[in-house]
Every structure is written in structure tokens, then in C-alpha cells.
Image: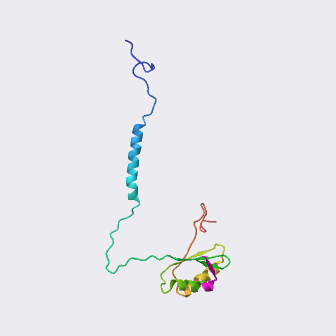
Amino acid sequence: MKPSSVSEPSGVYRVQAEINVTPLVDVMLVLLIIFMITAPMLTAGLHVNLPKAKAAQKLDPKPPVILTYSRDGKVELDGESYNVEQIVEVVEARLGDDRTQPIHLRADRDSTYGDVVALMDALAARGLTRLALLTGPAPQGSKTPAERP
């Protein structure tokens, strides 16, 4: 009887040149299940045990009044256009006695800085001080003024 060598493909033993995919699929499914279980836990945040208060009341979130200031000096509220003198009265009438409702101001980037400040000043002179300036996202790769040469 002749001993079999590795170079001979005949006989019972042959070299198998295929990858067994079953263990790979098993490992991937286990990893998928682990990530599916742990992902919701990562977004939960920090657990804090808040103190109790008897006088605490739920906040009633109010939608903001959104003003849009165009470059030609017109202020728009709910699709209607006003000038600066009119808009203060319209906003006051809308808010009534409740001065806690926020006012969001969307000003065109090409509008004059002094005109936007004048509108903010007119609102603040009447006690409407909960004012926020809205901006858009910066373009990708743009630098802030501090980063520019």
C-alpha cells in the first residue's frame, strides 16, 4: 500500500478551498441582537431622581410668534405684511396680557443691521423682551469670523 501524499487529489482526503459561511452568519446575528438591545439604552441619557414640590405646575408650552423681516424693511406675520410701527401693535394685540410667549425674529441677511436693532428696540420698549433671533445652518466647510485670516 502506497502512503497518500498531499499533492495527490485522489482518495478520501481532498483540499477544500471554500469558506464556511455559517459561523460568520451566526456571529453577525449575535452582534446584531446585541446592538439592537444596547442602542436604546445609549440614548436614554442620565437618570436623575428629581425632588418633589407641592406647588409645582406643568408648563404650558406656547408656540412662538414668528416675525420675518425682509431686506426692504417690511415685517411679515402670518402672511400679512406690516411696517415696523404697525407690527409692535399687532404683536401686542396678539399676546394680550401674556408677555411670556416668545417672539422669534427671522431677519434677511442682506437687511440693515441698524433696522433690525430698531425693530428689536421698538418691541423691547413695549415690554416684549422674550425675543430670539433665528439663523440658518452654516454651509459645509465655512469658517467663523474668528477663524478667518
The residue sitting at 37% across, 64% down in the picture is 46
Residue 118, quarter of the rendered image? bottom right
Q: Quadrant of the C terminus?
A: bottom right
In this rendering, is residue 69 above or below 16? below
- The single residue placed furthest to the front in the displayed view is 79
In this rendering, is residue 47 above or below 75? above
Residue bounds of the magenta highlight: 79-86
Give the image location of residue 90, x and y in percent.
57, 84
Give the image location of residue 7, x and y in percent.
45, 20
The residue sitting at 31% across, 79% down in the picture is 54
In this rendering, is residue 69 above or below 25? below
Give the image location of residue 48, x and y in percent.
34, 68
Instruction: Check if residue 33 falls in the magenta segment.
Output: no
The image's colouring method is rainbow
Residue 135, quarter of the rendered image? bottom right
The residue sitting at 56% across, 73% down in the picture is 134
Q: Quadrant of the N terminus?
A: top left
Residue 8, quarter of the rendered image? top left
- The single residue placed furthest to the top in the displayed view is 1
Q: Nearer the viewer, residue 52 or 4?
A: 52
Horizontally, is 34 left or right of 92 in the view? left
- The single residue placed furthest to the right in the displayed view is 72
Give the image location of residue 129, x and y in percent.
52, 83
Instruction: Check if residue 85 falls in the magenta segment.
Output: yes
